[in-house]
């Protein structure tokens, strides 16, 4: 990947034929600049496509409270709720920042965020998603905005991400150890990066155990809101799975909310969990413990808190080594799958 040379305040000053301090005054909206000079500087800014360094701009506006934007695909899903709780804990003792939660949506999220960034209201960014486009990466590198990513591995930014492959393997190995031979999967929308990885590892785990892989054991609900990570999608997919394979004895769900929907469909069919069908979810959201749902724990709250503390440190001038941490999820076994199936 190649990036354009970053345009600096020095380039603008040179092109406009003015001092750097004059460019700074124009960028910060100072009234101490003649209109003729302001127009000349603004023309140079437009032609060079100069994006002001927000950190420098913040320092110039000493009375301005910095705005931290937390960008997530959806702030209404339980997964990102858990992440945001961790963010809140990191900010509880911080009195000098404002936080703005930006809902990117699941369709073309990075372009929505780029449009938002172009409006110039972000001093620091915590970006939580499963992938980052080259366009957004370049835009952030040009702006020199402090950035920490969650869920995305990047050589350019501080980042925390999860080993999804390890999480799925742990769930499948557990179900296989419980002597299940007919294991289904409830997946999310195929265009979601995490959904693709989890489906791939499901297939690998089934084949590695010497079981026959049948793609029809993987079902996705018709409801694709939130990329299919929803109770409705889980409910629909579970009904479809049992219609095609009434002999299924265990189901791995790509998220806990899908597992909640699947649980309802299993109950409606008059079946028992885990005696008739074992169930394992992913994310380990707070309600799983109360329900007795086995789930892959990603420690989202802890990760959200660590990411925000790191971002605050970068904003205050901390310039230590870049942090790039991969978190290995752990399976928490509960009643919904803790049942040794007797060989038939």
Image (spheres, helix red, strand yellow):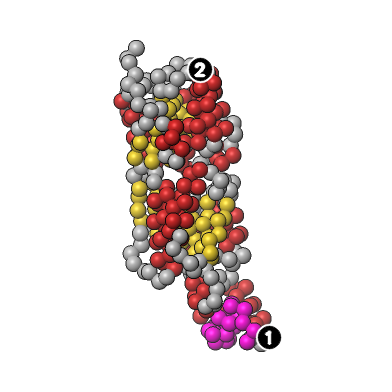
Q: Nearer the viewer, residue 259 or 205?
A: 259
Residue 21 percent across, percent down from the top left:
54, 85
Q: Quadrant of the N terminus?
A: bottom left
Per the rendering, the mark at residue 237 is: none
Residue 144 showing in the rendered view: yes
Residue range (magenta): 13-32
Residue 255 percent across, percent down from the top left:
47, 37
- Residue where numbered disc 2 is placed: 270
Residue 115 percent across, percent down from the top left:
61, 59
Question: Is residue 14 found inside the magenta-colored segment of the image?
Answer: yes
Q: Nearer the viewer, residue 259 or 40?
A: 259
- Residue where numbered disc 1 is placed: 36
User: For this view, does 139 lie left or right of residue 208?
Assistant: right
Q: Is residue 275 above or below residue 330?
A: above
Residue 134 showing in the rendered view: no
Q: Residue at x 52, y 69 (%)?
A: 66
Query: Looking at the image, do the residues carrying marks 1 and 2 touch, with CB atoms under 8 Å apart?
Result: no
Q: Is residue 321 above or below residue 163?
A: below
Labels 1, 2: front one: 2
Q: Residue at x 54, y 34 (%)?
A: 231
Instruction: Indicate the secondary structure of the residue bearing disc 2.
Output: loop
Q: Residues within 10 Å of mark 1 (few under 14, many from 20)?
A: few
User: For this view, does 125 lie left or right of residue 32?
Assistant: left
Instruction: Indicate the secondary structure of the residue bearing disc 1.
Output: helix
Total number of numbered labels? 2
Mark toward the start of the polypeptide (1 vs 2): 1
Q: Is residue 263 above or below residue 153?
A: above
Classify residue 228 by image quadrant.
top right
Q: Nearer the viewer, residue 142 or 290?
A: 290
Q: Is residue 267 above or below residue 86?
A: above
Spatial CA span between label 1 and label 2: 79 Å
């Amino acid at each position: 990947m190649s990036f354009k040379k970053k345009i600096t305040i020095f380039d603008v000053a040179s092109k406009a034929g003015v001092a750097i301090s004059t460019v700074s005054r124009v960028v910060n909206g100072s009234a101490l600049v003649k209109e003729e000079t302001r127009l000349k500087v603004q023309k140079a800014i437009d032609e060079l496509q100069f994006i002001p360094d927000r950190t420098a701009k913040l320092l110039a506006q000493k009375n301005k409270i910095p705005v931290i934007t937390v960008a997530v695909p959806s702030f209404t899903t339980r997964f990102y709720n858990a992440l945001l709780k961790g963010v809140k804990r990191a900010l509880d003792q911080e009195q000098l920042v404002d936080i703005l939660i930006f809902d990117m949506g699941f369709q073309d999220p990075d372009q929505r965020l780029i449009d938002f960034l172009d409006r110039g209201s972000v001093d620091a960014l915590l970006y939580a998603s499963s992938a980052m486009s080259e366009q957004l990466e370049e835009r952030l590198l040009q702006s020199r905005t402090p950035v920490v990513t969650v869920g995305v591995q990047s050589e350019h930014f501080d980042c925390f991400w999860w080993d999804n492959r390890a999480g799925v393997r742990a769930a499948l190995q557990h179900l296989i150890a419980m002597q299940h031979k007919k294991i289904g999967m409830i997946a999310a929308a195929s265009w979601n990066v995490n959904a693709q990885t989890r489906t791939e590892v499901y297939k690998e785990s089934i084949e590695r155990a010497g079981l026959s892989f049948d793609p029809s054991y993987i079902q996705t609900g018709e409801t694709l809101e939130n990329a299919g990570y929803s109770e409705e999608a889980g409910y629909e997919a579970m009904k479809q799975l049992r219609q095609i394979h009434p002999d299924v004895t265990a189901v791995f769900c790509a998220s806990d909310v899908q597992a909640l929907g699947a649980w309802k469909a299993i109950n409606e069919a008059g079946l028992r969990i885990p005696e008739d069908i074992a169930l394992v979810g992913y994310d380990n959201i707070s309600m799983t413990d109360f329900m007795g749902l086995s789930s892959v724990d990603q420690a989202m709250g802890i990760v959200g808190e660590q990411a925000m503390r790191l971002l605050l440190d970068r904003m205050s001038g901390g310039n230590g080594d870049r942090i790039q941490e991969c978190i290995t999820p752990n399976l928490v076994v509960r009643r919904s799958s803790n049942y040794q199936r007797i060989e038939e």
